[in-house]
Image (spheres, coloured by chain):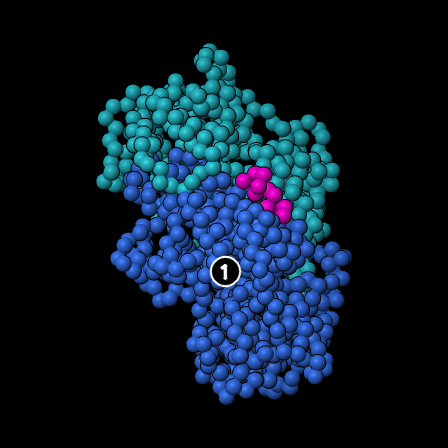
Chain colours: A blue, B cyan
Amino acid sequence: MLSTTMSTYRVLATSRPAGSHAAITMAALARARRPAVGVVVPASVAHAVSTRRTMATTVTKPKGRLVIIGSGWAGYKLLRQIDTNQFDVFCVSPRNYFVFTPLLAGSSVGTLEFRAIMEPVRQFNKPMQFLQAHCTNIDFDKRQITCTTNLEDSHDTLTLDYDTLVIAPGASTNTFNVPGVREHALFLKDISDARKIRARVIECFEHASQPHVTHDEIDRLLHFQTVGGGPTGVEFSAELHDFITEDLARLYPQLMPRVRMTLYDVAPRILGAFDAKLAEYATKRFVRSGVQIRTGTQVRNVEKDKIVLNDGEEVPYGLLVWATGITQTELVRGLRGRVAPDPRGAHRIVTDRRLRVLDPQGEPMENVYALGDCATISDYDLPATAQVANQKALYLGKQLNKTDEKAIVPFAYRHLGSMAYVGGWRAVVDMPNDIKPSGYSAWIFWRSSYLSMSVSWRNKCLIPLYWFAAYVFGRDVSRIN
Amino acid sequence: MLSTTMSTYRVLATSRPAGSHAAITMAALARARRPAVGVVVPASVAHAVSTRRTMATTVTKPKGRLVIIGSGWAGYKLLRQIDTNQFDVFCVSPRNYFVFTPLLAGSSVGTLEFRAIMEPVRQFNKPMQFLQAHCTNIDFDKRQITCTTNLEDSHDTLTLDYDTLVIAPGASTNTFNVPGVREHALFLKDISDARKIRARVIECFEHASQPHVTHDEIDRLLHFQTVGGGPTGVEFSAELHDFITEDLARLYPQLMPRVRMTLYDVAPRILGAFDAKLAEYATKRFVRSGVQIRTGTQVRNVEKDKIVLNDGEEVPYGLLVWATGITQTELVRGLRGRVAPDPRGAHRIVTDRRLRVLDPQGEPMENVYALGDCATISDYDLPATAQVANQKALYLGKQLNKTDEKAIVPFAYRHLGSMAYVGGWRAVVDMPNDIKPSGYSAWIFWRSSYLSMSVSWRNKCLIPLYWFAAYVFGRDVSRIN
């Protein structure tokens, strides 16, 4: 049952036996009865329409309604895994697509087109419902979530009942409360971020090439800075360096001697989670290609055109990308007191090994699961990576699909290694065994792995095609307003 | 010489012998002398850098500075044609790319990626300067234009001297002073428009599929309306119909019976400039596929969610695209009184057959040319199409490159025909002879012609590649915030 709490067309839940959802069903029937005045649909599609309508009017699925909050690695991969014959699936996410995040840095400079790393959440071969909305609250007692629709011209509040709930909204970028970051820095979490970065880089070059701009202003505009020396910051710096030297250098040759790039990290070295030799390799490559690495450096303050470091040094920037790890979303922070506290103080949702959310007493809740960057297992801490989220999603999908509860096994993580692109067709690969390749062969491995991991056949074809196009014809250098 | 009129670093023009531009040259030298602290550039690019720097310090070119206002069909095609050994070329345009407009409608629904119809204005193999700015005024006596830079965080005013000026800023969409159009309708002139349309279409479907939306609201959201039955409006309606029936129908099957599309025109038929039989073919195709054609209908008023027709009928819409012909830009309107009046009252700049702008006395000005949608020839009126702009640009480029002024010939237009896509792999082609193909073969002709007309080799390769990808994998259905 669905009820809107902000509008007059309120549909109140009167009783809620598991698995029934009369309100939707009646509406679907009512719609189906209306005369078809619409656009003429080809026969092949018309067939699909009638099939789907039948499915929509099915009143119950054996396991009732499964609500998945989020469409990232955890939510989307689970969605693909889940058996829609058993569950009536409802996905709630502010965006109607999944982003293949490992290739987001590359797409931010045009090595790939955005569409090659996006997958639509709606599956044309899978009956499911999708609600483009932020989940703002969860009522575990009523088994109900509250959402605010995320549409350009509508921000209605809805409530949605669940029989089974999966919490996977991901996390936000952590600004570590540095003032000015939210206002002035760009992030690298979503396609819209990548698009902003692409426009901004070209804007800096266009601005710097205008004849009236002062020397100081040119130096500011062409200083590209990244805060955070983890894989995201490193890969972004590498991709940006490629973009500048391979593509922009041809169009703005007179500006090239003025371009500077700096990568900051608080830690004593970049790629802290990687093998030390690999981190050293990456550092050397960056330094050799002119990217300054400033480790052990903290940013105190971000202003419109400059950052202020902890020792008071002011560094003007043209582009500032902030990639320093994650913090919990409003939704997850709001659950404090109603779920078990995070023993490691990161405000994550704590689950047991079956990914069931633990209540304040530390007991697993019935039919409420959490995974992805928002969650941790009480006695089995794992890093907040796409790899962990992906494995948890595949695991949970399998368990939820099981009809015999006795067959459910606890989650076990299998680390497959970490990789980072470091620019100029070179990468570092940190395998769980003693093999630690770096350089060109590692880059081949990096590209092949991500290609094989990309989700749909469409993108498995499009990604190499776009890589090839960028290699042959260069990246796109146009700035769209 | 360049002078900024809004800033402290003013560089005043003291004397202006044709062809000299000391201010830029000195700045270029000063920059060249600074130590290179920048990003390390590969040898191949470094070579290009040094080559370019030599060219930048050349003080004079035999024919002095050519300033081109605009980077559309007229400005960009001229730019490619012009001999940069004779001219010191300066292009001023608010966008740093050219748009292949005939394929813009297709890219607005994802049949093509945007980059395949864009060409960067900056040419890596051609010495030229580009200023991302709006031209706001022209002083014919001082031979100087005034510009406002079009950057996200800078809107400085600059003046720029010219020896030869080419005015080709294009035109704006004509709203015919219908209230509310600028505020609520979307246009189809630039990539940013196409991007807005794409996001809006998907937004309408996402919104309509939310469970709490009323029947009336669904009907409104899924009514896609286009005003203007010329080639732009027709092709957009055709592409949108393809997108909805081929791609969105798979993801939102339950909404398909509710989708409606309407195409309005004031004239008694659509495609007024085409052969009557072809227009009839297009009309029949649209009607058969469920697109309503409302000719002889005028829009009186546009409100946020509905349009009001001349007879008072109110029609709610989810998306309104306005494609009703052109009107002159502020720049061109501002020239009134300083150039010859347009005999046909459309406020265009009037030129002679050599495309030289006529002064108020009807005499051709020296070294000032106008072409594209902003211009007309006094005794030789031609439609404001890409075809005319393209031919004028190629003509003017050739004439300007000539060293012997006696060799200059008047412009002659050769009409090659008109084409329009009408959906479902069908098109109409109106040839200047009696051959008027329509249907599938005309569509093959339509695609091949535009492919052969597309400018760069890059896009000649990318366009069929993207067409193929859209055919095999479908168009992109994700909505980026």
Q: Nearer the viewer, residue A377 or A349?
A: A377
Q: Who is closer to the viewer here, B369 or B107?
A: B107
Which residue shows up at 61% across the image and 87% down it?
A15
**Which image quadrant is residue B149 in?**
top left
Name the quadrant of the N terminus of chain B: top left
Q: Secondary structure at mark 1?
A: loop
For the record, the magenta segment spans A464-474
**Between A25 and B160, the one nearer to me in the picture:** B160
Residue found at x 69% / y 83%: A405
Q: Residue at x 63, y 58 (%)?
A: A453
Residue visible at 62% across and 41% down? B463
Image position, residue A156 (x, y; %): 50, 71
Which chain is mark 1 on? Answer: A
Instruction: Give the residue type at disc 1.
Output: Phe
Is A237 on the left-hand or right-hand side of B430?
left
Question: Residue B332 versus residue A212: which sits nearer the camera?
Answer: A212
